[in-house]
Image (cartoon, grey):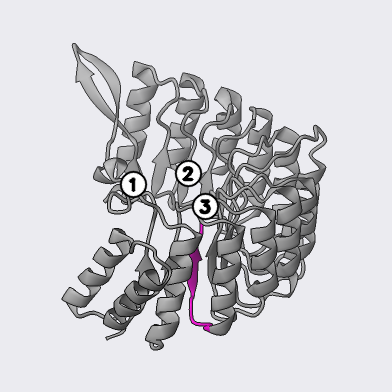
Amino acid sequence: MAAEALREGYVEACEGGERRPLSALLSFLDDVIGSQTQLSSLILKGNSKNAYPTRLDDGDLEALLKGMRKAGDVALREFDLSWNVISDHGIGILMDYLREFDNVIALRLSHNNFGIEGAKRIAEAINDCQSLSHLFLDGNKIEDRGGLILVEKLARNTSLRTISLGCMDLGHQTFTMLGKVLTQNNSITTLNIDRPILFSCQEESIYHLASGLKLNKTLRSLSIKNAGLRDHGCFLLCDNLMLNETLTELDLSSNRLSEISGQYIHNLLKKDLNLMRLKLSCNKLCDRGCEVLAQALPASSIVELDISYNEIGSQGIEALSVAIAHSTRLKMLCIWGNHLDSSSLQSYIAACNNCRSLSYTDVLMQIVDGEANAVRRIEPEDYYFPGLV
């Protein structure tokens, strides 16, 4: 079996390099061997309880790849090395291996220790890895220079479907290049560019990105959370997305959108009949922004809407309740963290109960001493932390 051969090769490589084998890796391989299943994925997340307190570093990765070469018949489809301490050197070794053995479909390298040089090595190899469809690099501080090198290569890439570049300190140059790349790339369907470092008050970076989105023909999901996005940036995005025919999911959570952005989102929902999932949590739409947005909701294509933590009061909730009553597509609605008084809460719950399409809302009503009180619905997955099991 491939798992047995890999285990033997890895232990031998560790002995040759006078390294101690990682107990988490040995445990993972032993489980695969015991279950007699095919080794198609290798999960070595550094934040799992099995990995504590030792995380995979460059030397461990080199020994692992030597073991995989020795095993020969290891054809991994998913490689998860997130939350470890892999540096630029380790990334270079890994990308050389992936060029030689092009079989990995999903590569997860989020929250490691590589920077600009590591981004350069990924950029050099990315177009040679034709099997690679999903790439996750979040949390590695490649900065604007590294982001520019990496994004520039995406213009000619035809294999990647998902690329996640959140929390990498990307800047204006990367966003400008990304806007250009989006007009040329015909493969990427999911893009995450959360928490960039953008300083311009005129939001020129968003202008370039939005211009690319207008002409893009493949992107279906876009996340720009915690980007410091203001109302003008929201206008630029919404105005250009009206001409986009493929985007179905947009996440603008944790930005600086005010009630003014409610009108821009209203215009987008009236025009765009492809957008199905919209997340706007942790902004400041307030009552007026919610009222305007709600007016467009019944005739829109929105199936899931998150406007939690937006400082919305009773006036906005009442307007939302009217919209829900006339909605035929809305299935999920999140409003927790706003200001719900007894009257608006009762109107909201009544509207939810009367909406045949709605199957989930994160707010429930509980009567205490004859008065209606909002209670947050807690699902089991809210307490599930994948990295700790």
Q: Amino acid at mark 3?
A: Asn
Q: Is residue 326 left or right of residue 40?
A: right
The residue under the point 53% across, 54% down is 301
Q: Amino acid at mark 2?
A: Leu
Q: Taking 52 as reference, is 9 above or below it?
A: below
Image quarter of residue 345: top left
Report which quarter residue 66 is drawn in.
bottom left
Residue 35 % position (x, y): 18, 75
Measured as percent of width and height from the top left, residue 4 is found at: 26, 81
Identity of the amino acid at label 1? Pro
Mark 3 or 2, which is nearer the eye?
Answer: 3
At x 43%, y 51%, the residue is 328
Q: Is 225 on the left-hand or right-hand side of 50? A: right
In this view of the protein, which residue sits in the foreground, 235 or 27?
27
Location of mark 2 (residue): 305
Query: On the image, numbered disc 3 is attached to which residue?
Result: 112
**Is residue 320 shown above or below 59?**
above
SS for dot 1: loop
The one nearer the camera, 338 or 25, is 25
- When the figure is inspected, residue 357 is found, relative to residue 79, above or below; the finding is above
Q: Tell me the crowding category of disc 3: few under 14, some 14 to 19, or many 20 or more residues within 10 angstroms, Cα based.
A: many
Image: magenta residue range: 101-109
Q: Please, which residue is most extreme toward the bottom here?
A: 73
- Asked if the stretch drawn in magenta spans residue 222, the answer is no
* Magenta span main SS: loop
Q: Which residue is mark 1?
A: 53
Marks 1 & 3, CB-CB < 8 Å contact: no
In terms of secondary structure, where does tag 2 sit?
A: strand
